Amino acid sequence: MSYYEKHVFFCCNQRDGGRTCCNDKGASAMRDYAKSKVKALGLSGPGKVRINQAGCLDRCEEGPCVVVYPEGVWYTYVDQADIDEIIEEHLSHGRVVERLKM
Amino acid sequence: MSYYEKHVFFCCNQRDGGRTCCNDKGASAMRDYAKSKVKALGLSGPGKVRINQAGCLDRCEEGPCVVVYPEGVWYTYVDQADIDEIIEEHLSHGRVVERLKM
């Protein structure tokens, strides 16, 4: 069994020179929001959920992106409502959110 | 199938105040080394290997630590020889390096 049941990585890459990147689309703020919400719901910790920032996941053009392991499911998101849905459906209940999949 | 066959995250957290942390043990340099080596070996890219830095994986006391997904195998390491072994055994050939497992 994984140390974390769901290990979530937000691409928080900041690219220079005007190239598209996840952080220009609010990635760091969304990662902070997800981390706080997961903690508030009592879902965080070993054997449960961990929310992490990560360097460039190299899918910025399709992003902002986030990946959930060990499933290896990739999502994009627009706003907090999307993050809420990923937390409620996938992280809480293990149901993949098809509409947000990359 | 995962977008990356092996997705590797190095905890590169820098803690303040003297608390133990992976970055004090050379994590960022080791991540750079791993990234360069994987690229040089032609292992990097979609369907293959991705090396990423990550924020705190919250196992700093046991670290420095790195996790390989989708397997969810955690390793610690001391030097470049350990990283070489993880790359050669696990990332190239899918064989878990038992002696470095956390």
Image (spheres, coloured by chain):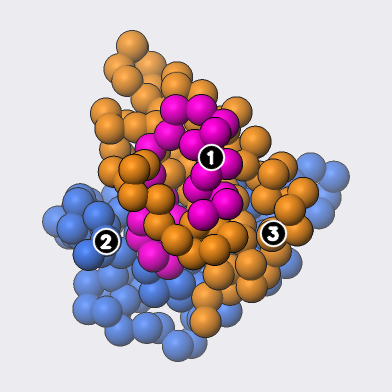
Chain colours: A orange, B blue
Q: Is residue B70 magenta?
A: no
The residue wearing badge 1 is A83
The residue wearing badge 2 is B2
Considering the numbered disc 3 on the image, is that residue within a helix, a strand or a loop? Answer: loop
Q: Residue at x 34, y 50 (%)?
A: A98
The residue wearing badge 3 is A44
Which residue in the rendered view is the most extreme toward the left?
B42
Comparing labels 2 and 1, the label whose residue is closer to the camera: 1
Q: Residue at x 49, y 64 (%)?
A: A94
Other-residue count near label 1 (Cα within 10 Å), few / some / many at <14 / 14–19 / ≥20: many
Which residue in the rendered view is the most extreme toward the right?
B17
Q: Is residue A17 above or below residue B74?
A: above
Residue A77 is situated, as x and y percent measured from the top left of the image, at 43, 34
Q: Is residue A79 magenta?
A: yes
Magenta-drawn segment:
A67-89
User: Do the residues indicated by labels 2 and 1 lie within the same chain of the protein?
Assistant: no
**Location of residue B76 (image quadrant):** bottom right
